[in-house]
Amino acid sequence: MIRKGILIVLFGLFCSLVNAQTERKFVRKGNDSYEQKNYTDSEIKYRKALDQKSDYYDALYNIGDALYKQKKYKEAAKQFQTIANQSKVSEDLKAKAYHNMGNALLKSKKLKESINAYKNALKLNPKDIETKHNLTYAMNQLQKQKKQQQKQQQNKNQHHFRSFFPISKFPFFEIMFSTPLLEYSTCAVSSATRPSPGHSIGQLRIYCPWSGAIAPGRMCA
């Protein structure tokens, strides 16, 4: 009986080892496709690795990268959100997931949501310069969007006023509405409002748990 129990344990260990090798094999194949810019195929390979082990977070994370490269920003954001919600994931990986989620949301024009994602990334990694840069960029874009919306609303209000109150019959109002309004504004434009060399907006973070390296365009092998 003891010998039989030992054999069962050894067989279980052997199966686990084989499965682990299979998972890693699919990830490596996915990485090769990713390097060749075949992002659709790389996504398929990563999903096959995930089929072997549902909590294989490296594969889950890389699926988000592949979706992002396919410009499926909404799906990519959800994928990175899934990673960030995992309790067993390290803070380092969570920070990178939030950073990439912010990039995907920014590409989707969801500025408020991208700002929240970048803030969550900085809570986990306050010294991340690239995330700080992207956060500043997103906040400036949101401010710009608000000003444009205010201007559109002012133009809409003016149009309604003209329709209700024909100013052509009243020369004074015609002069007033034809005179452009003066606005005070700052002339200086912060360099943070534009992507600077080495800090491109939307650059993905590639997570390599055994090397600790972040290399844009490279995947975990």
Image (tube, rainbow, N blue to C red):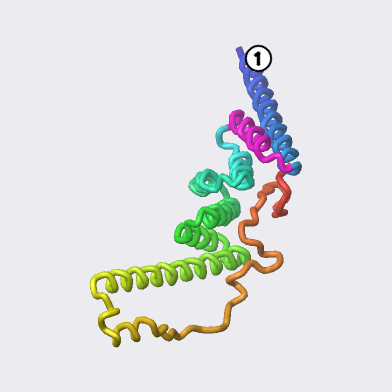
Q: Residue at x 51, y 53 (%)?
A: 108
Q: Could you say which quadrant of the image residue 33 lies in?
A: top right
Q: Could you say which quadrant of the image residue 165 lies in?
A: bottom left
Is 85 left, or right, of 34 in this rendering? left
Q: Please state the horizontal and vertical placement of residue 59, each as a whole percent of the image.
A: 62, 39
Q: Viewer-proximal residue, 65 or 82?
A: 65
How would you rate the neighbour count of disc 1 (Cα within 10 Å): few for under 14, some for 14-19, many for 20 or more?
A: few
Q: Residue at x 52, y 43 (%)?
A: 75
Q: Please state the horizontal and vertical placement of residue 101, each as a whole percent of the image.
A: 54, 52
Tell me the magenta residue range.
37-53
Q: Is residue 95 visible?
A: no
Kindly state the secondary structure of the residue where label 1 is placed. helix
Q: Does 54 sit above or below residue 180?
A: above
Q: Viewer-proximal residue, 12 or 78?
A: 78
Q: Residue at x 28, y 79 (%)?
A: 167
Say which amino acid is labelled 1: Arg
Q: Please state the horizontal and vertical placement of residue 44, each as a whole percent of the image.
A: 64, 33
Q: Viewer-proximal residue, 188 or 92?
A: 188
Q: Please state the horizontal and vertical placement of residue 3, each as a whole percent of the image.
A: 65, 14
Which quadrant, please, contains the C terminus?
A: top right
Magenta span main SS = helix
Q: Could you say which quadrant of the image residue 9 lies in?
A: top right
Q: Which residue is mark 1?
A: 3
Q: Does 160 sit above or below residue 212?
A: below
Which quadrant, please, contains the N terminus?
A: top right
Q: Is residue 39 visible?
A: yes
Is 59 left, or right, of 143 in this rendering? right
